Amino acid sequence: MSHLFDHHGAENTGYSQPPALTTKKKASVPNGLMRKSPARWPRLSEPEMVRHFTWLSKRNFGIDTGFYPLGSCTMKHNPRVNEVIAQLPGIADIHPHLPEHHLQGLLSIYYEMQHMLEICAGMDQVTLQPVAGAQGEFTAVRCIQEYFRLRGEDQRTKVIVPDSAHGTNPASAAMAGFEIVEIPSRADGRIDLDALAAVADETTAAMMITNPNTLGLFEADISAASAIVHEAGGQMYYDGANFNAILGITSPGLMGFDAVHFNLHKTFSQPHGGGGPGSGPIGVKAHLAPFLPGPLAARREATAEERGQAVDEHWYHWLEPEHSIGKVQQWHGNAGAVIRCWAYYRRYGNGLTTMSEHAVLNANYLRHAIHREAKRIGVDHLFVDGAETEVAKHEFTLSMQPAKEALGISAMDVAKGLLDRGYMAPTVYFPLVVPECMMIEPTETESKDTLDTFAKHFVEVLTCDPEVLHEAPVTTPVRRVDEVYAARNLCLRHPFDDA
Amino acid sequence: MVDQLPNRGRELEMLNEMGFESIEDLFADIPADVRFKGELPLRGPQSEEEIISDARRLLGANLAMGQRPAFLGAGLYRNYVPASVFQLVTRGEFLTAYTPYQPEVSQGMLQAMWEFQTLISELVGLPIANLSLYDGSTAAAEALTCAVRVHTRKASQPNTVYISALTPPDKQSVMFNYCQGAEIEIRTIEHHEDGSLDLESLAKAAGSCGVYLEQPNPLGVLDENLVQVKDIIGENTALIVGVQPVSLGVVEAPGHYGADIVVGEGQPLGSPVTGGGPLYGIFACTQPYLRLMPGRIVGRSIDVDGNEAYCLTLSTREQHIRRHRATSNICTNETLIALMGAMHMALLGPDGLRELAERNLQACQAAKEALQATPGVRLVHDTAHFNEFAIAVPGSSTACLAFLDANGITGGFDLSTWYPEQKDRILVTTTDQTSLADIEALSAQLALWSTHQEVNA
């Protein structure tokens, strides 16, 4: 083990700094504000610091380490050129408050990204300000709220979500002050139009839904659902978490949605960084555009004078929407993430459709391969599809309920068994509507060979002695972690000896 | 031709094995009336070399702050981030991981975040820190809603919080958006002419749920009055202090003068300014706020063999379990940027942080001395400052900044943007990257500007 707080070696500091500027009078902090005792931080030389964090990195699993089929998270390869670009001083060392003529490059990239996302989503206006998917949801719901307030429809206080929705949907709508109405899914995992029709009324502000849904199924009745909500005067909100399945094939606009968020870190490969940063732009139809957070990137033809500083024939500028809800982040969003995703988009251009086709091809192939391998070794009775379907989209679910009943092997056991075989585990126990659920999303950047090998390993886990499997994982840096112990014996920071 | 798809050329083989004939079969479940017709009207794909060439050209059209003297801050601070931080953070095991839901294979990031929590906790003087929110503004906004959740039942001013009137409007806007859903009213507290907090104005906040103040304040003023705030507002009103974390190398930790929650923009520790994001929001608190706080938190535990192990804990506050009753909707946060912060903090150590803070303090002092001696320029607040200070210039601040810009200097932040009635004020920001030559250039150009104004007057 290496512990940061065990290091007291380096004299003074691990990082030598140039001398401070000399002044006539030495600067000082008012007496009553002077720090009395320094933070008990460790003292490491650079070699010790580098070794500590390198050691930690070796105890962490990323896409670079191996296959990462974490459903709903779209863990695709992160091209490294995007990292190189994000470190260029023209993005890393720019301040958002610089005047527009010093930000023409950033503005043009923002404009290009807004425009591209508008086309892909079938929306009229995109803002890049929200910094994560959940914040995008919140932002869009706020825009819908102000839209209705301006129209005098204050009675629209409810947001409808299916029971299979991501937890962020109800959380975001509740944060904006809406009451949540949850509707059950049908037995086949799809939206229940009757249940929707029963709750959609003059109090409905919006319905939030993702399509393909969290079971990886395309909601073929989506237009009918949109019609029901619109008929009741509500707005349709598209959760873009699963956008990787449909890019260039269909769009939220075509399905009748009024607003959508994108998870750029999923679909456009901003590295997930162990939990963030992300980027969660939203797109809306024209009637919601005046409410978007500002500023948006806009452009007009450049004047002869401006040509010298312009990056093309346009002059780019910020634009404040008329009834803007204001800000959800203090600056212009996660610009560094937007730049990476711009580089990713440029890689594909109009070939983005191929990206989605391969994401869906891989998901269906993996589903097929797992069933094939299970039949081959005779364990196909131990799991069933989370939902019956001819084809899945970018992800699919399996229910381990039969294994649980027959052998006491849970979805969690299978997950831990996969860790021992060198994989990240799929998402488990989500969506809640599938018992003992495993949600598997391979993404388009995995090879057929990887998928075949994973399928073999997946079913091999089911042949394990359940007692042995309960003990998994055994090859990982630590074995099963006691989460109950963690919650009962809260230790949220290093316990200094005197504490 | 896109080079990111390993199964190009194997489509048919895979499809046939599944009993399909074309990719189209996989999309048969999507009704025709919602299908895209034709090709996406977008540009063609590019190679890596073409992309990087375009990126260099476009981003090269932006003005990097390092290209010339720059005094723009106002919430973001251009500090030097050591090379080792960038080298380490791009290790694929960190970069390409996601939320550590499987702790057995995520010990590296979990332990790093637990160490981050400890570093922040020690820095701000509070026992608990989470593993980051989006940025300083959302951390401040979530602190307000958290304070209301904790205090509103006993408050004589329920659902009410107070913030410094100097709080930048963009940050106030974020606060409003986060608070309006819970019907929280945000009121303001005034400051004296010298920039210090008006303690009489503060008195009206007693009995409310929380008070949000910044140290240094948004005009760079180090304000001794904050030390008295907790005694005035009392036990049942949260004192929330927003900090510039580097300042805490020399300035007292708010936890040591009564703060219940400390938030801040983490960026100066570990991250470049990056056009305003990604950044990371610091959120730390005392015990009573723990179970109602937003964001993820890592706990140290044991594995089945009794060995030390780390995992996410207190997750029942979060959206994936609590859904609409969660303390926040946050899911993806800013872990990787927080990791950069942890690396920078670890490398600095306590002495290095003090040294860094002193360099920032001295740079500010050097600029104040130079501008005090610059004809026509007046320092607005005759107090101690960290990083930045307000000046008044002859004529309009907007015109003055345009003049400086035309003469090769990014002069500072136009305070008329925040406070429209202040037409002649500029916020001048210095950091450890500010040189005496930069300051001399600013002073010389401001002197020139003043002369021009006199001539024209």
Image (cartoon, coloured by chain):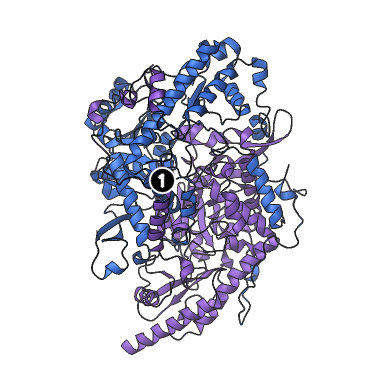
The residue where tag 1 is placed is: A344
Chain in blue, by letter, is A
Question: Where is residue A198 drawn, in percent x and y?
Answer: 29, 23
Chain in purple, by letter, is B
Query: Could you say which quadrant of the image residue A28 lies in?
Result: bottom right
Residue A292 seen in this snapshot: no
Query: Could you say which quadrant of the image residue B252 lies in?
Result: bottom right
Give neighbour class at mark 1: few <14, some 14-19, many 20+ (Cα, 10 Å).
Answer: many
Q: Where, quadrant-wise, is the N terminus of chain A in this rendering?
A: top right
Mark 1 falls within which chain? A
Q: Secondary structure at mark 1?
A: helix
Point 58% across, 18% down: residue: A460
Point 49% across, 33% down: residue: B320
Name the residue type under label 1: Tyr
* Vertical relation: A271 (above or below) A166: below
Nearer to us in this view, B237 or A245 = A245
Question: Where is residue A483 drawn, in percent x and y?
Answer: 64, 31
Q: Is residue A180 left or right of residue B351?
A: left
Residue B222 seen in this snapshot: yes
